[in-house]
Image (cartoon, rainbow, N blue to C red):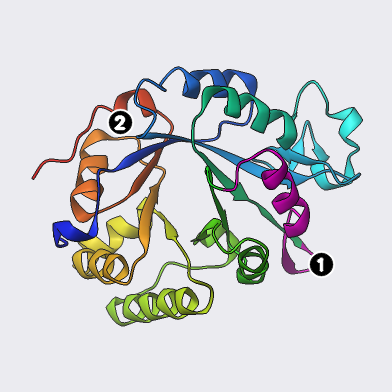
Amino acid sequence: MPDPQYFSLPKIIAHRCNDEASIEKALALKHEPKEIYMECDVRTTGDGVLVAHHDPKHRGKSIRKTLFSRLEGSVLSLDMLLDKVNQGDIPLHLDVKAGCINGKWKVAADSEQLYGLLEQKGFLEKVIVTSIKGEFLRHLRQLAPKLRLGVLYDEDYGELLPPNRAAVNGFIRKILEFHEKILLDAVFLNQTWLHVFDKRYHILDKFFYTLIKAGLKIAVWTVNEKDQALHFMQQGAEWITTDIPETVTKVRYKT
């Protein structure tokens, strides 16, 4: 288990708060605001409007090829979402999605546009922004040196689960090298990967300890079982992303 000096009380991220109902559900948990974050996914419409939407399509139509006027009423603009979250004074995790276009992964939002909106709405100190793309994160870091940034690893985007213990060590080095380049705040990791690191390679303790000692915070997604949440908290996870925050929020760190 990591040295206690390197971690603080874990926080819960309510997963996929991309619509009115999920936002209201997350805001209802604000009785413990320091422990509750809200996550939403960011994409851009065909006419350049930033929206909160997890999937690349809405009702069978590509978000990036559709005018916002044709989505309005069923898809929230990021502008509208920030206004709603601001009223509830709740921290936010923005996961900027990527799409595969002509065989290449491209970020589904413009860094300058996102930065401008966050600055306008007073969110630069109340948000952590993640992406799978290093170039996007580097540009955001240049625009806003104090903005909290996290890299997200996901096999859906071609970042495959390391096949053996040596590859896990290489994965750790890759994260640390990227951290040195842009001063990341956090790493967001798939709980399925971490389960394999723990059960097959017996390297989870080292994995967490090395990253935390380097100054990185760890977020684990998507964890919907209390025992798993507690396990990752005990390893030093800073954030637990879950579909059931009202349940996982009851789990407390136990020494």
Amino acid type at circle 1 is Asn
What residue is at 63 percent from the left and 60 percent from the top? Answer: 144
Left or right of 207? Residue 41 is right
Pointer 1 with pointer 2, Cβ within 8 A: no
Frontmost residue, 89 versus 1: 89
Indicate the secondary structure of the residue bearing disc 2: helix
Q: Is residue 143 above or below residue 220?
A: below
Residue 192 x %, y %: 36, 53
Judging from the image, what secondary structure is the residue with disc 1 in?
loop
Where is 31 relative to 37, above or below? above
Please state which amino acid type lies under the numbered disc 2: Val
The crowding category of the residue bearing disc 1, from other C-alpha atoms within 10 Å (few below 14, some 14 to 19, many at least 20), is: few
Q: Quadrant of the C terminus?
A: top left
Mark pair 1, 2: CA separation = 40 Å
Which numbered disc, 1 or 2, marks the residue that appears first in the sequence?
A: 1
Which residues make up the magenta segment? 101-124
Q: Is residue 248 left or right of residue 82?
A: left
Q: Which residue has dot 2 on it?
A: 248
Name the disc covering residue 102, or none: 1
Q: Nearer the viewer, residue 92 or 71?
A: 92
